[in-house]
Amino acid sequence: MSLKVNEIFYSIQGESSFIGIPCVLVRLTGCNLRCSYCDTRYAYEGGTLWELSDLLGRIASHRCRLVEITGGEPLLQAETPALIRSLLEGGYAVLLETNGSLPIRGIDRRCVRIVDIKCPSSGESHRNDFSILDDLTERDEIKFVLGERGDYEFARDILLSRNLAAKTRNPPLLSPVTERLDPKRLARWILEDHLSVRLQLQLHKILWGKDARGV
Ligand SMILES: C[S@@+](CC[C@H](N)C(=O)[O-])C[C@H]1O[C@@H](n2cnc3c(N)ncnc32)[C@H](O)[C@@H]1O
Ligand SMILES: Nc1nc2[nH]cc(C(=O)O)c2c(=O)[nH]1
Ligand code: SF4
Ligand SMILES: [Mg+2]
């Protein structure tokens, strides 16, 4: 019963509808995708094995009731559902960031599951498993990370054809690839098309710079 962890840190949540709120981030090692823009390639390998009870102790030491499990791809590890359940039972609010290629059915529905639907310029959009969208609850979040206009049109067409804005309480997130797509261009496209979405920039990079680690 152990988890391979790349890093654990306490910071301002930089993404999702929880943006701006202090949060403990647990970054698990390993990923089944290789997105062209990935900013956490250092999490593909390495890391340290943690027993679940030790990991819970380390998380508690940060004195923060909001925890995000990210990666890499957290759903690759067999113990991830148990970690999430233990945190929920300990009274934490729990967020999970996942890449849209793996089933979320085994993850406790009290957890906010943030599902990233990969767009063409990631090079991994063929890995999207759209059947996951049927397992979302209204507290979950849907996200697209956009590198260019073609990605925007891909996301817009999926959002509209599948009526994704109606699936979750929070509007779907559209986030530009940092330093690849100018956020102003994305803002204009969203307004032109009157999309019911949330434009989301990576707040931690605005605060601490795009290459800072452990923030
Ligand atoms: C590092 S991933 C980890 C979770 C999971 N593997 C996934 O892709 O959702 C966390 C989030 O960061 C986003 N991301 C990664 N690199 C980015 C970049 N350069 N600019 C903007 N978002 C990025 C991903 O698309 C994902 O939504
Ligand atoms: N502050 C901060 N917030 C984040 N939200 C999601 C992150 C991620 O890398 O998954 C992240 C991150 O790396 N840092
Ligand atoms: S799925 Fe997430 S961690 Fe994996 S390569 Fe893509 S952005 Fe990086
Ligand atoms: Mg990140």
Image: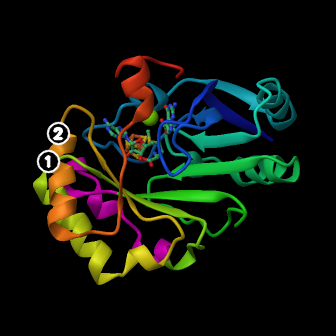
Q: Are marks 2 and 1 in contact (CB under 8 Å)?
A: yes
- Point out residue 77 in the picture as x, y percentages from the top left corner: 63, 47
Look at the image and give the residue range highlighted in magenta.
118-133
* SS class, disc 1: helix
Q: CA distance from mark 2 to mark 1?
A: 6 Å
Tell whether 159 sits left or right of 140. Answer: left
- What is the chief secondary structure element of the magenta stretch? helix
Report whether the residue tagged 1 is closer than 8 Å to ligand 1: no
Say if 181 sits above or below 84 in the image: above
Q: Quadrant of ligand 1?
A: top left
Q: Is residue 78 magenta?
A: no
- Numbered badge on residue 103: none
Instruction: State the image quarter where residue 64 is shown.
Output: top right
Say if 107 sits above or below 79 in the image: below
Q: Nearer the viewer, residue 116 or 171?
A: 171
- Numbered badge on residue 182: 2
- Point out residue 184 in the picture as x, y percentages from the top left corner: 17, 43
Q: Nearer the viewer, residue 63 or 211?
A: 63
Q: Amino acid at mark 1?
A: Arg
Q: Which residue is mark 1?
A: 185
